[in-house]
Amino acid sequence: MSVDAWGFDVERQTAAHRLRSLHIRLSAIRTAVAAGLALALVLGGAGALRDWVVSFRVPPWVATVLFLVLLFGVVTAVDLPFRYVDGYRLERTFGLSAQRFAGWMKDLAKSLGLGLGSTVAAGSILLWLLGVWPMWWWLAAWLLSLAVSVVLAFLAPIVLVPLFFRFRPLEDPSLRARFESLAAQANVPIVGVFELRASEKTRRSNAAVMGLGRTRRVVVTDTLLRDFRPEEIETVLAHELAHQKFLDPLRGFMLGSVTSLVILAVGAWLYSILFSSLGIRSIGDMAGLPLLAAILGLVSLPLRPLELSWSRAREARADRFSLQLTHDPANFATAMAKLHDQNLGVADPRTWEKWLFYSHPPGRERVELARSFRGSPA
């Protein structure tokens, strides 16, 4: 294996660059197609779909559900080829997926089922809010979204993630004790240490602290346990524990709450100005949902690079905490190199890629941080 000056596998990084290039091209085409579909819906497609649904003379709530189901079906049908290429074909081609097509389809069906259910529920509630509070619907929607976010964060490790991956308590008692001791050193209480059976579907490795309150736990993929030394895994876990130490989930929730409030407020104002000029009969007309979704998406775009920049700063702080907690820069550096190589993450992205796509510092920056570590406070 040939490695570069930072310890990254040259061949794997070459493949990572090829994969990244393909992802960017596919994403550009996918965005253009999605924009075309949104434009078609806004300029009359959603109105025609509404009129067709209403022609059945069913109760209003049935018409609303039927409209949302059909709208979800249209969007899904257009996006499905991109999901296949991006989520299955490329993953198999580059050796990242261990999942057969039947297994991928099963997971796709689960995600589509969740997506359909959430679309019908959220769309129905949103239309009701638009009809009841046409001036302040956005504020009520914001408050509801905050409550749902908290509930989902609590339920994710015990309900949502198990729909796609199997969990089990970490069986190795010495390794479990080692990780629990690390959490105690970081002063981060956890429920336990769990192994996520990722190898059944992917060759990627990862670790995380999931959940809130009594559902909070350390989760380690079996691929990480299999392919990394315990000392390397400790540096990865220490990074994840840092997020809990510095209340990053809470900070992220607060920042996301403020951001979403701004997006909703601005989006609601623009929607109130534009909807009548585009053939939408009232502010609560179901045919206006594609326009509202497009406006919210466009308003959120300028905030994305700012959110990523804040995320990179948060992740860099977690890296520094990991180094201070473990005092093991050598294993931190090798862990970062192995994670990027195994997951085919580009370690040296171009500047514009970093600012547009990266929520974490690039791999080379993380290795350089470890090499310059002298144990000083952050």
Image: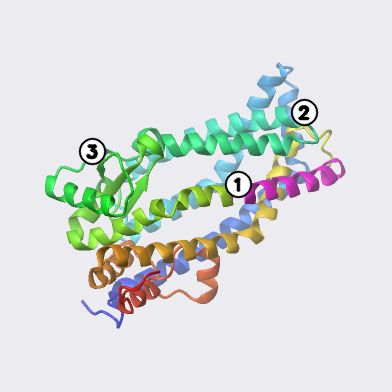
The tag on residue 87 is: none
What residue does disc 2 label?
A: 131
What residue does disc 3 label?
A: 168
**Left or right position of 238 against 84:** left
For label 1, the crowd category at 10 Å Cα-Cα, with few meaning under 14, some 14 to 19 and many 20 or more, is: some
Q: CA distance from mark 3 to mark 1?
A: 33 Å
Q: Tag 2's secondary structure?
A: helix
**Left or right position of 327 against 129:** left
Scheme by which the image is coloured: rainbow
Sequence-first tag of 2 and 1: 2
Q: Is residue 335 visible?
A: yes
Q: CA distance from mark 2 to mark 1?
A: 24 Å
Query: Is 264 colored magenta in this rendering?
Result: yes
Q: CA distance from mark 2 to mark 3?
A: 47 Å
Whole-percent x, y for residue 186 in the image: 31, 54
Q: Are marks 2 and 3 in contact (CB under 8 Å)?
A: no
Residue at the extreme right of the image, as rendered: 277
Query: Magenta segment range?
Result: 256-277
Residue flagged by tag 2: what amino acid is it? Gly
What residue does disc 1 label?
A: 257
Whole-percent x, y for residue 46 in the image: 73, 38
